[in-house]
Amino acid sequence: ITEIVADLDSIVRFGLSTYTSDNGNSNLPCPRLPVAGDPFAVSPRVDFDLNNSSAISNNNIYPSNYPSNAGGDTPTGDSIDALVSIIQSDPPPAEGPTIIVLATDGEPDTCEQPNPQNGQAEAVAAATASHAAGLDVFILSVGNEVSDAHLQEMANVGVGKPANESGNPAPFWKATTPELLAEAFQQIISDSISCEIEIDKPFNIDTLAQACDEGEVRLNGVLLDCPTDWQVKNEPPYKTIELLGNACDTLKGGEVTFTAEFPCGTIVVE
């Protein structure tokens, strides 16, 4: 996963938080999410930012301080609620979606009842509330310890579908090898990268055809064709270049150079 973060952290703002509790120990907070100044934090939280791969892959922090070293409980619902509050208190920039990738290796429990693992309803409710707050939740099972039924419910509500959606259920991911884990994480992140690039000034709606015919949009120096590879998104505020097809795939694949030049009169200069 850290290799994927390194490939994409120039265009994706990554953050990282672990979560756990401590076997119902009432002397410690639950859930145990890293927060500033928390003396009980398992490991530091890495807040959203570009070029964050070095912080996330710091071997002095991860993976040496996995949550399981501190107790191994899985208060998933409580932790999603806490993380949503953290994000809302200090939100990342609005460009593109902000999502939560929940990677877990066990059925959820709750802070009130660490054993047995009966926290499924609370986790589903938290994922539902996260989506309602504008933060979609994508669930990734690390191993086979989480039931498909719970994974499916979490996947559904995490993107705004009914928990029991059967006609068009949302995808979930189950990784039993490092390779499958990497593939699943890559797919989740790539699917969430927007291929819409907003510019500072709006296009002149009367000259959109000229912008398409005479504009030069390039990825990694390669000239793209309009409207096959890109187009001006024809809706207010007319400030968005949308990459299409293979060009979109290239953008999602990792670090790229994007340039765009247009003739005078196709951009409104105030």
Image (cartoon, rainbow, N blue to C red):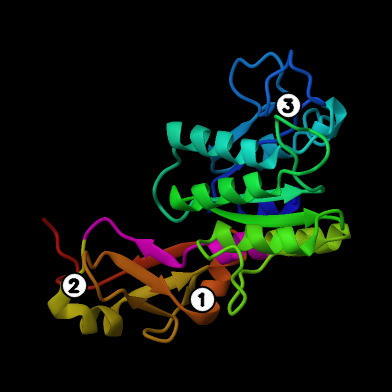
Type of amino acid under label 3: Ser
Instruction: Judge the density around disc 3: few (<14), some (14-19), many (≥20) Cα neighbours within 10 Å.
Output: many
Residue 58 shows in this picture = yes
Q: Nearer the viewer, residue 38 or 182?
A: 38
The image quadrant that residue 19 belongs to is top right
The image quadrant that residue 39 belongs to is top right
Residue sitting at x 69%, y 38%: 56
Q: Secondary structure at mark 3?
A: loop
Residue sitting at x 44%, y 79%: 224
Report the disc number at residue 43: 3
Residue 184 shows in this picture = no
Q: Earlier in the sequence, mark 2 or mark 1?
A: 1
User: Is residue 219 positioned above or below 41 on the image?
Assistant: below
Question: Which dot, 3 or 1, sits closer to the camera?
Answer: 3
Instruction: Judge the density around disc 2: few (<14), some (14-19), many (≥20) Cα neighbours within 10 Å.
Output: many
- Where residue 65 appears, as percent x and y from the top left, is 82, 29
* Labels 3 and 1 touching (C-beta < 8 A): no
Q: Earlier in the sequence, mark 3 or mark 1?
A: 3
Instruction: Judge the density around disc 1: few (<14), some (14-19), many (≥20) Cα neighbours within 10 Å.
Output: some
Residue 189 colored in magenta in the image: yes
Type of amino acid under label 1: Ala
254 vs 204, left or right, is right
Question: Which dot, 2 or 1, sits closer to the camera?
Answer: 1
Disc 2 and disc 1: Cα gap in Å?
A: 22 Å
- Where residue 200 appears, as percent x and y from the top left, is 27, 55
Please give the residue where the numbered disc 2 appears in the rendered image.
Answer: 266
Report the disc number at residue 34: none
69 vs 224, left or right, is right
Magenta part of the chain: 187-201
- Where residue 268 appears, as percent x and y from the top left, is 15, 64
* Labels 2 and 1 touching (C-beta < 8 A): no
